[in-house]
Image (cartoon, rainbow, N blue to C red):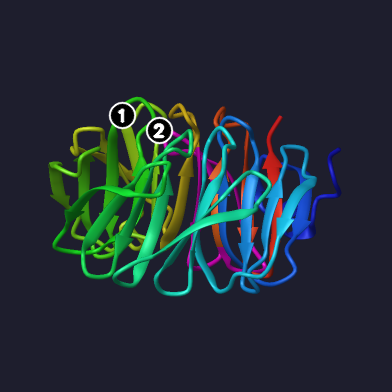
Amino acid sequence: MTQQVPDWIHQGRGATPNVDWTVSTEAPLVALQMGRETGEVLAADEAGGLYLINRAGAISAVSRGRAPIRAIAWGDTGGGGIALVGKRTLYWFNRGLKFDKKIVLSDRALNVALDAHAEYAVVSLDGGQNLIFDAPRKPIHEFKTYQPLAHLEFLVHEPAIFGVSAFGMFYKFEFSGNEIWGENLWSDVGGLSVSGNGSTILLACFAHGIQRYTGDGQSDGSYQLGETVSRISSSFNPYRMMAATIEQQLCWLDFQGQVLWSAATPQKTVAIHCDPLGYGAVCGFESGEIMRLSWD
């Protein structure tokens, strides 16, 4: 059921979205992920709380106790997830958020990603090492990059991984870890979003705006919002995207670069995730408030 729209959304410019649901975590939000096939949202807070939210906005599972959670990943099909806890511990958990396996890593971990079926995981380490694990939680591949990878994403239609360092090196790797190509972005990067078939990649490049790349690593233009873009998410097919800025603007755009709606948010945006069809997005804010916005 559509909820009352907050004033800050009404005060935005463009087509005002509906607020389909709102959920709040018990402590400040640290991470947010979406299962693109199930529509479920996984949230983690500073106190070690994990929350699985279904597409209707109801909390279907909660887990508490392991803290501090620094990063999470959730399978698109809802089969389970992983979490980085503390500096070096990687946990696996099922869709009931029951933790069942863990590995203590050799170095401080930076980020994680899961494939669509939650069968394979990749974790990046501070020293530039990257480990790929299979479902039995055993490392099967290892590769190294000159700069440690801050952002990771498995491709859906190809056994490959995209990785981006915080300081602007952009890579595509085979599933084995062999480098396919690498590009220097000449910009820091706050976020990575890949279309479903991997043909379009969007990068939140702060003062350089939203940079767009093809699947073979070629620059395909940019979108300039006049602010410092720190988060980006696109629909499964290149149709809609949402961006957040350091100046606390939230922007809903089409792929021609037209801003369809924008608003000043009352607090920092931690994470954003477009739904696969581009009808709306889930936004998570630092207080722990999570809301789904949609457009008719």
Q: Which residues are magenta?
A: 241-269
- Residue at coordinates 69% horizontally, 38% vertically from top-left? 294
Locate residue 75, reporting x and y percent: 52, 40
Which residue in the protein does label 1 denote?
Answer: 199
Secondary structure beneath label 1: loop
- Kindly indicate whether the residue at mark 2 contacts the one at mark 1 (C-beta within 8 angstroms): yes
Amino acid under disc 1: Ser
On screen, residue 26 versus residue 43, left or right, reads right
Image: 276 above or below 249:
above
Residue 204 seen in render: no
- Residue 268 part of the magenta-drawn span: yes
On screen, residue 53 versus residue 108, left or right, reads right
Locate residue 282, reporting x and y percent: 63, 47
CA gap between label 1 and label 2 equals: 6 Å
On screen, residue 71 versus residue 15, left or right, reads left
Identify the image quadrant of the C terminus: top right
Which residue in the protein does label 2 denote?
Answer: 195
Secondary structure beneath label 2: loop
Which residue is more in the foreground, 212 or 130? 130
**What secondary structure characterizes most of the magenta part?**
strand
Question: In terms of image quadrants, where is residue 185?
Answer: bottom left
- Disc 1 crowd rating (10 Å Cα; few below 14, some 14-19, many 20+) is some
Amino acid under disc 2: Ser
